[in-house]
Image: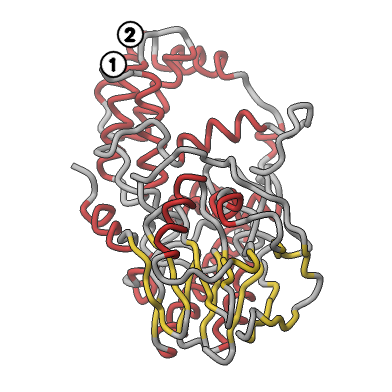
Amino acid sequence: MPHPELINHNKQFPKGVIDIGKGCWAAVGFAASNVHMIEGNASVTIIDTSESLSAAQNILAEFRKLTTKPIARIIYTHAHRDHISGAQVFHDGSQDIIASHKFTSDLVKSDKNSSTPLQALKKRAEAQFGMGLNSKERINLGCGPGDRPMEGLGQGFIKPTYLIEEDMDYDLDGVFARFIHAPGETEDHMVVWLPEKEILFSGDNWYHTFPNLYAIRGTTYRDFGKWADSLKLLADLNPEILVPGHTLPQFGKERIRELLETTREMIIFLMEKTAQGLNAGIPLDDIVAEIELPEHLAIKPWLKEHYGKLSWSARAYATGLLGWYDGNPTNLGTIRTAERARLMAELAGDLENLWNKAQSTENLQWKLELCDCLIALGEPAKKLKADTMRIFAEAEINATARNSYLWGANKLDPKD
């Protein structure tokens, strides 16, 4: 049985177009990310375009029930693929596509001759998002619904035609807007602020779950300090309506300020606690294993670890700032996986004892690690590892961890 809190998190992705008032709408639950529409005098503006052509087509059909005004422009809040891959559906060849001048993405680059480990990234992304899992296995993505149309996934991207160098005011056909650079989940993040309507389109700098400070699909370091600064910038705008790139819109100045400020407080706590541990010479594994949010933050529903995770983020912060070396000279050298496994078996006494330990231990993390040793030695431990990962998955509140456990288990021990 999946974790009930992860199941309950599906309430953040009810499929439909939400009228957020003042001529603005948010399409939620159609795809991993949201798409937004702003109505001007004679045209509309689209903010972000979803992850696939099929999702974008479904969203546009719903938008067309509200207005037949032509689309005048498309705005990308940032370059993650789930926000830019439906552009061809909304674009007729005449509109500007607006983005930050820092627009770039590890998932957009496709040069097969590049030294970038694109195949590793693709494989890990498939695991994180549970590609190939059925609807009972993939409860959601943490940031969006698990079940959604996949036709044309990642295929509809169009390059920006107009890049924003500095924060600037912009006329969205009678709707006064300001484009504001706000690095956070990505360096190229640009939010759209409608000061007269007091509506803020925040991209992925805030959503109703623990932020993805580190994505287990693999990512370069996301600057935690800049992200915290951007959350203060957004809070200081004092919006009446907050429209995120994932999960439901939020309403009310007091509530929105609390959402943004407590998320910022969490990031600062994480940075400070990790730094304190490193400065005290505490091994990173121990910092990661022991870090916990203070109670007043841990109880916030929007900081539940459905997408990002505190322990992963602590590790990412440490390695992002200091690199892989942890200060322990032992780790300047290394032992190959198979040799380490052989030494582990030797330490256990023999292979039979190593098997006995793997099968009998109640520590599931240790069981997985012992299974890895057995597999490295050519032993048939894949099913034991798969069964253990499935146990982990059922207890997980984190969607990306659950998906990765189940994806990995199904690769080792395919189900009929």
Q: Is residue 17 left or right of residue 201?
A: left
Q: Which residue is mark 2?
A: 352
Res 157 visible:
yes
Q: Which residue is mark 1?
A: 356
What is the x, y in percent for residue 415?
28, 20
- Mark 1: secondary structure: helix
10 Å neighbourhood of mark 1: few (<14), some, or many (≥20)?
A: few
Amino acid at pointer 2 = Glu
Amino acid at pointer 1 = Asn
CB contact under 8 Å: marks 1 and 2: yes
* Residue 307 occupies quadrant: bottom left
Nearer to the camera, 142 or 402: 142
What is the x, y in percent for residue 66?
41, 71
Specify the quadrant that holds the C terminus.
top left
Q: Is residue 64 left or right of residue 279?
A: left
**Residue 345 to residue 51: above or below:** above
What is the x, y in percent for residue 318?
62, 54
